[in-house]
């Protein structure tokens, strides 16, 4: 009864009321699907999104149903489903999946008040969706195998013969595809093709970021390209998989300093457009970003002035290359990586 009363008060007032109060969200994705529930296709971390939606539902009374999957899986599913999709909202870990759905013309414009909560560098110029979180590319290294002053000066250096067999990465995942997309956006197609050819020669291939970090920690390989938060999460627990390693931030707007934007968008053909916009505003608002900033994920908040969790370096200190996240192409990356023999 309480939730219904809150919902009745909130939806007509919509964004203005949410943005003024900075309210929280919550959720609970029940298996039973209430007719008026928001359906979210979720490629973000399941635990984080469940924390978000539980708080959102508690605050607003708007029920949420989550459909979990990966970036590529759900973005391709949305394109295949088109206007027949049951999704109201799409959340991702990396922006190339958002770009795929945007290019298919499936997003409704994000409410201007929501966009104003997010600095321009953390959302696409198109306004078709918005950033909701971020993660930084880093080089994890084992100081017993390579000294800090011996590390490559740029991510692009890793294509050189001197680094053969000395670094690892997980090329099959959406995380690494986003990093390659940034190389493509900042360095161009020819340079990206050369870098991928160098990677095919030089890199030890692992299943994903965690496997790469574990290999560096175990001394299998001196260095690995991963996202930052895997290391910080492990350090916050037992450091079992990272205790022998350190992180190197390339900085200097190098492609190796790329910050990948996690996105959120409202599907134009969804059945609950007002509630979907409310949810997106809530994610970018104080409540949603605080849950992110204080939570287990160690990802970066990108909106509402919420700081990152200690001991992360500040997001604006990473000196990342400027990349419009809506130009990062998943398909072009897959084509180039397939051509290089990495997929």
Image (tube, rainbow, N blue to C red):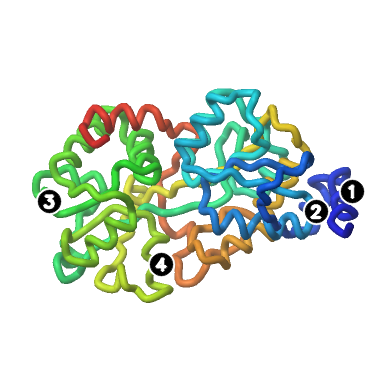
Residue 61, label in figure: 2
Asked whether the residues under the numbered discs 1 and 3 touch, taking CB atoms below 8 Å apart as contact, a structural biologist would say no
Left or right for 206, reference 123: left
Percent x, y of residue 271: 74, 32
Quarter of the figure that contains the N terminus = bottom right
Give the alpha-carbon distance from disc 1 to disc 4, as whole Å. Answer: 41 Å
Label 1 environment density (alpha carbons within 10 Å; few <14, some 14–19, many ≥20): few
Asked whether the residues under the numbered discs 1 and 2 touch, taking CB atoms below 8 Å apart as contact, a structural biologist would say yes
The answer to whether residue 324 is visible is: no
Identify the secondary structure beneath mark 2.
loop
Residue at screen point 36% across, 43% down: 173
Residue 339 found in image quarter:
top left
Q: Where is mark 3, residue-wise?
A: 165
Residue 232, label in figure: 4
Identify the secondary structure beneath mark 1.
helix
Asked whether the residues under the numbered discs 4 and 3 touch, taking CB atoms below 8 Å apart as contact, a structural biologist would say no
Label 3 environment density (alpha carbons within 10 Å; few <14, some 14–19, many ≥20): some
The answer to whether residue 140 is visible is: yes
Left or right for 247, reference 260: left
Residue 8, label in figure: 1
Q: Nearer the viewer, residue 111 or 125?
A: 111
Give the alpha-carbon distance from disc 1 to disc 3, as whole Å. Answer: 61 Å
The answer to whether 253 is drawn above or below residue 127 in the figure is: below
Left or right for 46, reference 252: right
Label 4 environment density (alpha carbons within 10 Å; few <14, some 14–19, many ≥20): many
Asked whether the residues under the numbered discs 3 and 2 touch, taking CB atoms below 8 Å apart as contact, a structural biologist would say no
Query: Farthest bottom residue?
Result: 238
Q: Earlier in the sequence, mark 1 or mark 4?
A: 1
Give the alpha-carbon distance from disc 4 to disc 2, as whole Å. Answer: 34 Å
The answer to whether 340 is drawn above or below residue 9 in the figure is: above
């Amino acid at each position: 009864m309480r939730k219904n009363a809150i919902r009745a008060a909130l939806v007509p007032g919509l964004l203005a009321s949410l943005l003024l109060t900075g309210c929280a969200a919550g959720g609970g994705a029940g298996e039973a699907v209430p007719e008026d529930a928001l359906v979210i296709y979720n490629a973000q971390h399941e635990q984080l999104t469940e924390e978000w939606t539980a708080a959102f539902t508690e605050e607003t009374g708007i029920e949420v149903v989550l459909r979990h999957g990966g970036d590529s899986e759900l973005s391709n599913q949305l394109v295949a489903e088109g206007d027949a999709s049951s999704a109201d909202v799409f959340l991702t870990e990396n922006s190339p999946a958002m770009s795929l759905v945007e290019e298919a013309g499936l997003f409704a414009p994000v409410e201007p008040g929501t966009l104003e909560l997010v600095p321009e560098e953390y959302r696409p110029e198109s306004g078709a969706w918005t950033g909701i979180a971020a993660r930084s590319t880093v080089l994890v290294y084992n100081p017993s195998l390579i000294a800090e002053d011996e590390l490559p000066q740029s991510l692009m250096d890793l294509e050189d013969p001197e680094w053969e067999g000395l670094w690892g990465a997980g090329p099959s995942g959406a995380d690494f595809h986003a990093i390659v997309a940034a190389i493509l956006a900042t360095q161009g197609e020819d340079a990206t093709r050369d870098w991928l050819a160098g990677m095919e020669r030089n890199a030890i291939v692992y299943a994903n970021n965690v496997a790469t970090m574990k290999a560096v920690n175990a001394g299998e390989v001196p260095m690995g390209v991963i996202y930052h938060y895997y290391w910080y999460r492990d350090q916050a627990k037992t450091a079992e998989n990272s205790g022998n390693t350190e992180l190197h931030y390339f900085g200097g707007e190098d492609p190796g300093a790329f910050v990948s934007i996690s996105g959120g968008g409202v599907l134009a053909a969804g059945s609950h457009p007002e509630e979907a916009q409310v949810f997106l505003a809530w994610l970018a608002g104080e409540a949603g970003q605080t849950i992110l900033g204080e939570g287990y994920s160690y990802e970066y908040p990108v909106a509402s002035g919420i700081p990152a969790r200690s001991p992360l370096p500040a997001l604006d200190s990473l000196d990342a290359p400027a990349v419009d996240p809506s130009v990062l192409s998943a398909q072009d990356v897959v084509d180039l990586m397939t051509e290089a023999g990495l997929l």
